Image: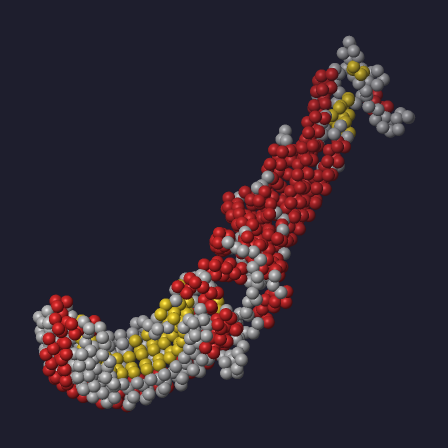
Amino acid sequence: MFTLAEVASLSDIQPTYRILKPWWDVFMDYLAVVMLMVAIFAGTMQLTKDQVVCLPVLQSTVNSKVQPGTSGKADFTTVETTTGQGEEKDSSGRRTNLDFQQYVFINQMCYHLALPWYSKYFPYLVLIHTIILIVSSNFWFKYPKTCSKIEHFVSILGKCFESPWTTKALSETACEDSEENKQRLTGAQSLPKYVSTSSDEGSPSASTPMITKSGFKFSADKPMIEIPSVTILDKKDGEQAKALFEKVRKFRAHVEDSDLIYKLYVGQTVIKTVKFIFILCYTANFVNTISFEHICNPKVEHLIGYTQFECTHNMAYMLKKLLISYISLICVYGFICLYTLFWLFKKKNTFNTLLKRSEKRVREESSFSDIPDVKNDFAFLLHMVDQYDQLYSKRFGVFLSEVSENKLRGISLNHEWTYEKLRQHVSRNAQDKQELHLFMLSGVPDAVFDLTDLDVLKLELIPEAKITAKISQMTNLQELHLYHCPAKVEQTAFSFLRDHLRCLHVKFTDVAEIPAWVYLLKTLRELYLIGNLNSENNKMIGLESLRELRHLKILHVKSNLTKIPPNITDVAPHLTKLVIHNDGTKLVVLNSLKKMTNVAELELQNCELERIPHAIFSLSNLQELDLKSNSIRTIEEIISFQHLKRLTCLKLWHNKIVSIPSSITHIKNLESLYLSNNKLETLPVAVFSLQKLRCLDVSYNSIAVIPVEIGLLQNLQHFHITGNKVDILPKQLFKCVKLRTLSLGQNCITSIPDKVSQLLQLTHLELKGNCLDRLPATLGQCQLLRKSGLIVEDHLFDALPSEVKEVLNQDTSIPFPNGI
């Protein structure tokens, strides 16, 4: 026979798994233990005391039942064993002709024939049924595909419960003012949808296209109340807490993709319910079959001599009481199973919404209103833990909250990036401004806002960047870079940026990454947008909202546009410079350019243009045009530039131009002409009729001859013809006495005329890569030329006279004449 300890071991589970057992499972476990005790007690009694006693029914006894004085009851024969004679007698002393062995035989025969089967096997049935119920209760802890997830969850839950960060986070949120907490819980209703500004001019309205068309959602975060730290989190505890956040995130992603644990739990509950109904149905029929008296007809008259026996079952009363107790326990067990099924199926057989009530309470008690909605097995496990003890779900909610994670990141970040460390990363940029570049951090350190003398702040790959009200201390900040950094701003911080920020660079992958508050910076002067604006997902591009930027002067778009968005004309009256870098995508539609009459600088780079767009000729205020890196082959339309009276700079470099039309002479005011990296073979005389030309760049073409007419360019200051096929320098070149830069490298020049000494203002002379055998000694007469500005082979420089080298090596600088 099994002992109680051996059978109870079937229900044994690891103590840590008990946190997943709600009250009904615990109650059912206790009921199962009681049922086990009933089975073992009944079995023990049956093995030790269970027996029947049978006596033959005599004819005289049967007749005596009708005699007076018997009260209608059977007069059972009493058997006496006569010592020494081996005979049995009845109560009247009548012999039965049966010996002791025959009585034993009859008792055993009638035990199996007369007793109902349920009386004999009741303890074993109870034991089997109870074992099945116990196995069904804990099968989800044992099944291979679920036990690993449960074990992992319990392990993470224990670490979350014991983590110092849990106590710190809950303690800090407990310190918050109750009214402030209430406002946070109802923040979606109480916070304004848009940023509230102090003036009507900067206040967005419901008709703002950026809001209605692009689908952006923006609400400025309220300034956070400074909560004093209740405990100090050391670095080790912080790292452990960050690891826990990552574990919870990965486990949630792994478990939320299925509901196997939930289905298995439902399945085992259904099995227990069916088992309860089955036990109740067949057991109720056998309650009345357990009786103390039984009639036995063994059909062994040829052995015994009697056909009928009266038998008594000495365990009948005990077994009946145990059976009634067992049925009562089963009924209680079954009602709990039905309640469990009702709890599981009351949400239309899905568990995804069961956590709503628990989540609401957890949010309220933990003060983390951002705890996300979870689903499937992850939701089921959390809800089971919540049924066990609400403290577990409350402390686990800390690691589901982004607010909590951001606080942890902020503590770790501020601990690592102190004011002194940030100061070491401040540098001077090309514009001699103090610049700080932060890359791939978990957030923006608070100490950044203490750098009050910072001019430029660059934030790159910081997904959780948040600009707090402390930025108002940075009074010198006028330029901000957000590279893949959808920064959030508090309301006070936005007000400061709106009034002080002048230049903003935004680099993004998807247009949705552009912070919505960017379009509300009314004092912004320069905006640089770098990212994909032409994908199917970005059709609702919010460039139309740029009209709110009423002081915007420079718009720089580096993307892959096929046309200039028509809505960009909203900012056309304000723009003075438009730059479009198209990364090789062909720009087809340019008609909207005609409306941008105030644009003074226009750059259309890498747009796969094959001709100069006609829309450009309508820009009467255009001063500089840059068509770099296109596919322009002919520039016959250049004659139309004569209508652009203010055009002074024309950049057609990095194209496929093979010739310069003579009509270029009509651009009277042209001062700079860039034609490098094309396919030019000659320079037409018409170029040299541009008397105001100060810079001419024809580098990296196939030009073999520099026309003598170059001497007509008396205002020429910069001449670049590097990387061509020039072999002779005309003497007229040195009549351009205002030349400051002369680039002649990588040609076929064999000698430099001595008249180079006439270039008294020359500061840069490139001669490297030619066929020179010497340098003229007259280089020493170029008063402003120094060795650093002379690009030539070392052996040629060393061959110069010592006095010339001494002049070129002088460090003193001579100021340029006025007007240069």
| On-image quarter of the N terminus | top right
Instruction: Please tell me which residue lies in front, 549 or 350.
Output: 549
User: 169 or 416: nearer the eye?
Assistant: 416
Percent of width and height locating residue 405: 51, 59
Q: Is residue 67 visible?
A: yes
Q: Does 362 appear above or below 334?
A: below
- The foreground one among 474 and 503 is 474
Q: Tell me the residue at 70%/24% (across/down).
A: 109
Q: Which residue is nearer to you in this view: 541 or 298?
A: 541
Residue 171 as seen in the image, left or right of residue 776: right
Residue furthest top in the image: 84
The part of the image, by quadrant, that contains residue 509 is: bottom left
Q: Residue furthest right?
A: 68
Residue drawn at the location 29% of the way across and 82% of the way down: 625
Q: Is 334 drawn above or below residue 570 in the view shown?
A: above
Q: How is the structure coloured here?
A: secondary structure
Residue ID at (10%, 82%): 731
Identified at 75% across, 36% down, the residue is 321
In this rendering, the answer to whether 202 lies above or below 25 is: below
From the top left corner, tell me how far across and down residue 103 is, in percent.
73, 19
